[in-house]
Amino acid sequence: MGRKVIIPVSLDIEADRDILRWLEKQGNRSKAIREAIREHLARGGVTLGDVYQAVKGLERKLQAGAVVIPSSGGGEEWDEPPDAAAALDALAEL
């Protein structure tokens, strides 16, 4: 049997409620966590989840009263990274 390292992790009952619910459904929590971490590491770059979280963050700011002011540049374009563009395209298809 391989050598093991135990790494304690703290979860907040309210802020991490989604993670706690997911963990409750797992038969082997350690295995599920290892697989989730490996999947995350394999993806790298910007994920659809990252885009979703960014959009939700903007939504919260707008609901709180933030105002969006267009830049004075007019026709200035922004080059988005290819992985971000792919994530946005995938989000649009949902």
Image (cartoon, grey):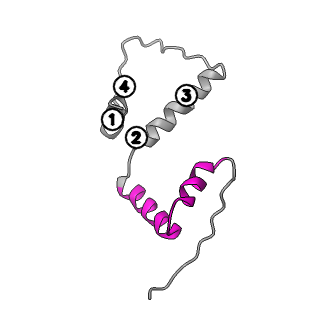
Secondary structure beneath label 1: helix
Q: Which dot marks residue 48?
A: 2
Q: Amino acid at mark 1?
A: Ala
The residue tagged 3 is 58
Q: Residue furthest bottom?
A: 1
The residues tagged by marks 4 and 3 sit, at their Cα atoms, a distance apart of 18 Å
Asked whether the residues under the numbered discs 1 and 3 touch, taking CB atoms below 8 Å apart as contact, a structural biologist would say no
Q: Is residue 61 above or below residue 31?
A: above
Q: Amino acid at mark 3?
A: Leu
Asked whether the residues under the numbered discs 2 and 3 touch, taking CB atoms below 8 Å apart as contact, a structural biologist would say no
The residues tagged by marks 2 and 3 sit, at their Cα atoms, a distance apart of 15 Å
Asked whether the residues under the numbered discs 2 and 1 touch, taking CB atoms below 8 Å apart as contact, a structural biologist would say yes
The residue tagged 1 is 90
Q: What percent of the width, then of the height, locates residue 48?
A: 40, 40
Q: Is residue 31 above or below residue 49?
A: below
Q: Which dot marks residue 78?
A: 4
Q: Which residues are magenta?
A: 15-42
Q: Which part of the image, by quadrant, shows the N terminus? A: bottom left
Q: What percent of the width, then of the height, locates residue 87?
A: 35, 37
Q: Nearer the viewer, mark 4 or mark 2?
A: 2
Q: Residues within 10 Å of mark 1 (few under 14, many from 20)?
A: few
Q: What percent of the width, then of the height, locates residue 35?
A: 42, 64
Q: Amino acid at mark 2?
A: Leu
Q: Amino acid at mark 4?
A: Trp
The residues tagged by marks 1 and 3 sit, at their Cα atoms, a distance apart of 19 Å
Dot 4 or dot 2: first in sequence order is: 2
Q: Main secondary structure of the magenta part?
A: helix
Q: Which part of the image, by quadrant, shows the C terminus? A: top left
Secondary structure beneath label 3: helix
**Residue 54 left/right relative to 39:** right
Secondary structure beneath label 4: loop
Q: Nearer the viewer, mark 1 or mark 4?
A: 1
